[in-house]
Image (cartoon, rainbow, N blue to C red):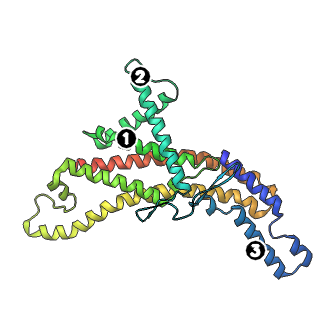
Amino acid sequence: MFATIMLLAALTGAVQAHGPAGETPAAAEHGTATEHGAAAQGGHAAEEEHGFDILHHIQDSREIELPGGVIHLPAKGSWMIAGVDMTPTKHVVFLGLTGLLTMVVLVGAAGAARRTGHEGAPRGRHNIIEAMVLFIRDQVVMPNIGHGGERYAPFIITLFFFILFSNLLGLLPWGATATGNISVTAALALLSFIMIEVAGMRALGPKGYIGTIVYIPHGLPKALVPIMALIMTPVELVGKIVKPVALAIRLFANMTAGHVLILAIISLIFVFGSLAIALGPMVLAIALMFLELFVAFLQAFIFAMLVSVFIGLIVHAH
């Protein structure tokens, strides 16, 4: 909601500065189509200069906007390590903040639980974190993975909180949603894919794991075994690849779509160039911000739930 109000203030300020849409001093003075077009181009240039376009607030960049000004990050290629560009961008900075926040919150809650022991539950914010951790472990990890699921609980709990904090940081004024970057969600999906496949290898052994790729139903006549293997092996391989791809696209699309919709609704004030319609877009944007808050928790939960389901499916393939 705060982000909505701040962006609304910026857009309405731009409306007052540029005047009503389609009417500029040059067009009013000369009244020619050519000059009117030039004035419109100048208006678009001013929009780009002030960054009021939607993509500017969603895409990654090399500057971080703050209330007091703009922090310019190093130029591309400034930090090269073994031929790889490690120069930080806005999303990389917010990923670092997300990781730091996740570590501080979870380690702090674990320390509070250790100090409390069996005497009672931690108090204050640590009690909330412990309740969330227990919910993910008891209602998400264990029911979907089953026996042996406790060894995967730390990974899935960390994954849940990391995605949640990244989603929530994008709702703050001047924040950025790193999970709205397909590269970030693809990396999270790749880590989950590795965890899923390693869990299958450990639980099934080499022969059992190969059976998850080369699927041969029990009792199949020997003459049909090569044909079934030829047909089902590509299907099983595609299934393994589709799972992480679906995880990456689902999280990326949901986090991007919400921000695009909110910014598009608020931009109606700037498009029409009138404060008379400000109340409608403002009310809709605030309502969508509450929906985005719910989606931030929901998408973190869904990602953790699906990873648990996929681990359970391969660990208990029978």
Give the residue at mark 3: 41
Q: Give the mark, 3 or 1, whose residue is nearer the N terminus.
A: 3
- Considering only vertical position in the picture, is 217 above or below 117? below
Q: Give the mark, 2 or 1, whose residue is nearer the N terminus.
A: 2
Give the residue at mark 2: 115
Q: Tell me where residue 287 appears, x and y as whole percent.
A: 64, 47
- Considering only vertical position in the picture, is 31 above or below 261? below
Q: Tell me where residue 222 appears, x and y as whole percent.
A: 7, 66
Which residue is most to the right?
29
In the image, what residue occupies the spot 46% across and 45% down? 162
Q: Nearer the viewer, residue 257 or 105?
A: 105
The kind of secondary structure element at disc 3 is helix
Tell me the distance, in whole angstroms, between the alpha carbons under discs 2 and 3: 64 Å
Residue 295, visible in the rendered structure: no
Q: Dot 2, how many residues are within 10 Å of its Cα: few (below 14), some (14-19), or many (20+)? A: few
Q: Dot 1, how many residues are within 10 Å of its Cα: few (below 14), some (14-19), or many (20+)? A: many
Q: Tell me where residue 119 appears, x and y as whole percent.
A: 40, 17
The kind of secondary structure element at disc 1 is helix
Q: Amino acid at mark 3?
A: Gln
Q: Is residue 44 left or right of residue 258?
A: right
Give the residue at mark 1: 140
Q: Amino acid at mark 2?
A: Arg
